[in-house]
Image (cartoon, rainbow, N blue to C red):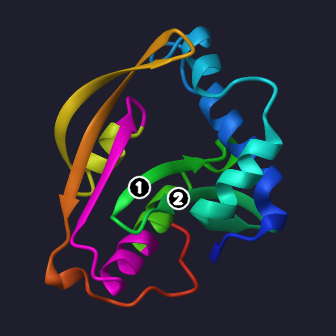
Amino acid sequence: MEIQTYSADNAREIADLFHQSVHSIAPSLYSSEQKEAWAPSPVDYERWAERLTVTKPFIAVIEGRVAGFIELDADGHIDCTYTHPNFQGRGVASSLHEYLVAEASAKHIKRLYLEASLVAKSFFEHRGFSIVKKNEVQRNGVTLINFSMEKYLSPNNQKQPTAQASDD
């Protein structure tokens, strides 16, 4: 697995990855209606290309394919963390998170924060994030649940990011 910075060549693949990832979530967590409100069909590739030009996510590449991505804003906000369904359980999100923490530390960001879905909540809890509050978000008239979470980085996180990340 290799961690790379975003390239416009990856925009369509990332947009598809997001859509497939959301729509593969178990129906016990989010209904079809909720998943469609979260990731509408068809995918709006133009909007995604514009968004990714601004957010410039870190991407995990396995066998020449985008396996996952994560976004870090300058203020420490993590906006997206998604793994393609075909690559889940292979350490993609863990490697992306480790890379993001190293990048944040190198940029002297002291606090990371995000709004985690029901799926992502335990992933971030296992990495030291605390729940600040539970949120009910309205999207296209549909209510989605997520959690505001945060983590303060310690001086021990001050290692430099590496261009390569290993498979878990």
Question: Which contiguous range is marked in magenta?
Answer: 99-119
Mark 2 residue type: Ile
Q: Secondary structure at mark 2?
A: strand
- Which residue is label 1 attached to? 78
Q: Which residue has dot 2 on it?
A: 70
Q: Residue at x 40, y 69 (%)?
A: 74
The answer to the question of whether label 2 and label 1 lie on touching residues, with beta carbons closer than 8 A, is yes
Of the residues under marks 2 and 1, which one precedes in the sequence? 2
Residue 111 magenta-highlighted: yes
User: Would you place residue 75 above or below residue 164 in this image?
Assistant: above
Is 74 placed above or below 148 here? below
Please tell me in which quadrant of the rendered image residue 36 appears. top right
- Say which element carries label 1: strand
Q: Give the number of the mark in front: 2 or 1.
A: 1
| Image coordinates for residue 56, horizontal then vertical, percent | 61, 66
CA–CA distance in space, label 2 to label 1: 7 Å
Residue 104 is inside the magenta segment:
yes
At label 1, the amino acid type is Ile
Q: Is residue 35 left or right of residue 149?
A: right
